[in-house]
Image (cartoon, rainbow, N blue to C red):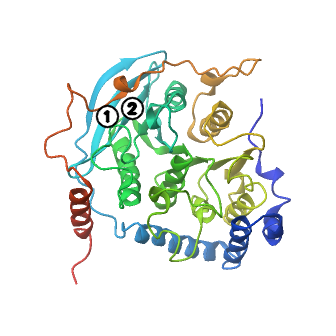
């Protein structure tokens, strides 16, 4: 069993790596230099907390979510329950704002008593098949449920059942971050969910959603961003960098990931994408923040130097172990066979079985359609939260 690397293995690196940016190139060097500058802006836990609050406000302000808009009724739709080996699956939608639906699937444990931990599972820009319908998405959600957690897989805007606008919508970052916050609301609306055990994990663009949500919503108690934390790369999509969330104050995704401190966090990185520098550049910065808060045992980096950009079993396994430790889950559901065969016992369902909206379950009347109509509804909703002059 290859176990997640512990902090002790990285503590000798510390911030010294940030003083040697010449080991990176181009934008990578700029990212390392930026982290070095940022590290000089605070020396104590109190100074970091002030910095963290400024960055957190900058994210929400850049996303046009400051102040946060009202939490309107979710009006959940849950149907088509199926039972499999140790878990069930249901098709789910709820309104993150009036007339705009978050769509996904809810995986629940069978044969276990609650209250249950709950884990959000945003997906990335992986295709063939797409988004939450992918076998690896179904595998991790079903396995979390078999381990004793309720898991929710939900669509990016413009993917899966979320077709009220496209993924090219200029407000996609705002919509997705608000959807994630409301997804926490949805999970907490389930009476069997333990509010003290909320987690989130996703890869690539889902990794961005993971650390953004953990940064702005402290109800998330444990997070695991996979193949995405980087000081020099913000993602190639408007849903990751289409709003000025890195500018006021100046920051980057490595520092945003550090905003989860002191809550437990596992950062999974690989040698085959923009996370290849994490062990020597990004992780030492994040580890130092946790150290300032006396929580260095709560952050880990699991690095796979010979692997590529995905959320395969080699990445899911350390994430399962991480959440088992920090959310009190049963790891026996994922014991590994001697030949390293993934032990996830699950049924891969076709997209049409996972669909929320179909002929039998049409999207409700009154749903807002199209980018312009959604923008009007969104910004009217946001303005309703702003104080009158």
Q: Residue at x 68, y 75 (%)?
A: 44
| Element class at badge 2 | strand
Q: Which residue is mark 1?
A: 92
- Looking at the image, which is closer to me, 212 or 358? 358
Quarter of the image with the N terminus is top right
- How far across and down, in percent of the image, does residue 15 sit? 79, 67
Q: Is residue 247 above or below residue 320?
A: below
Q: Is residue 59 above or below residue 257?
A: below
Q: Residue at x 53, y 53 (%)?
A: 208
Q: Residue at x 34, y 37 (%)?
A: 191
Quarter of the image with the C terminus is bottom left
Q: Quadrant of residue 66?
A: bottom left
Image position of 233 (left or right of 174): right
Q: Give me the disc on residue 106.
A: 2
Query: How many residues crowd around disc 2 within 10 Å: few (fewer than 14), some, or many (20 or more)?
Result: many
Circle count:
2
Q: Are marks 1 and 2 in contact (CB under 8 Å)?
A: yes
Q: In the rendered image, is residue 66 in sight?
A: yes
């Amino acid at each position: 069993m290859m176990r997640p690397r512990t902090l002790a293995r990285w503590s000798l690196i510390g911030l010294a790596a940030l003083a040697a940016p010449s080991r990176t190139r181009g934008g990578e060097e700029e990212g390392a230099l930026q982290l070095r500058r940022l590290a000089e802006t605070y020396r104590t836990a109190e100074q970091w907390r002030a910095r963290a609050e400024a960055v957190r406000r900058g994210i929400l302000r850049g996303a046009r979510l400051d102040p946060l808009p009202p939490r309107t009724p979710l009006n959940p739709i849950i149907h088509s329950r199926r039972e499999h080996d140790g878990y069930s699956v249901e098709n789910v939608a709820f309104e993150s704002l009036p007339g705009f639906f978050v769509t996904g699937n809810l995986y629940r444990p069978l044969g276990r008593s609650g209250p249950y931990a709950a884990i959000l599972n945003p997906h990335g820009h992986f295709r063939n098949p797409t988004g939450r319908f992918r076998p690896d998405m179904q595998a991790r959600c079903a396995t979390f449920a078999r381990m004793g957690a309720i898991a929710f897989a939900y669509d990016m805007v413009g993917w899966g059942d979320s077709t009220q606008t496209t993924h090219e919508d200029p407000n996609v970052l705002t919509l997705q971050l608000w959807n994630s916050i409301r997804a926490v609301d949805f999970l907490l609306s389930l009476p069997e969910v333990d509010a003290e055990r909320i987690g989130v994990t996703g890869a690539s663009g889902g990794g961005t959603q993971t650390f953004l949500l953990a940064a702005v919503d402290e109800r998330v108690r444990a997070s695991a961003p996979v193949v995405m934390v980087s000081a020099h790369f913000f993602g190639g999509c408007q849903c990751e960098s289409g709003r000025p969330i890195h500018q006021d104050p100046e920051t980057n995704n490595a520092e945003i990931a550090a905003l989860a401190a002191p809550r437990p966090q596992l950062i999974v990185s690989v040698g085959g994408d923009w996370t290849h520098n994490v062990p020597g550049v990004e992780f030492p910065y994040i580890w130092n923040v946790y150290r300032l808060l006396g929580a260095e045992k709560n952050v880990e980096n699991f690095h796979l130097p010979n692997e590529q950009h995905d959320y395969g079993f080699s990445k899911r396994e350390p994430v399962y172990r991480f959440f088992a430790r920090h959310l009190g889950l049963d790891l026996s559901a994922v014991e590994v066979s001697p030949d390293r065969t993934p032990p996830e016992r699950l049924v891969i369902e076709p997209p049409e079985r996972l669909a929320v909206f179909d002929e039998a379950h049409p999207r409700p009347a009154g749903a807002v359609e199209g980018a312009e109509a959604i923008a009007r509804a969104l910004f009217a909703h946001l303005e309703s939260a702003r104080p009158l002059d």
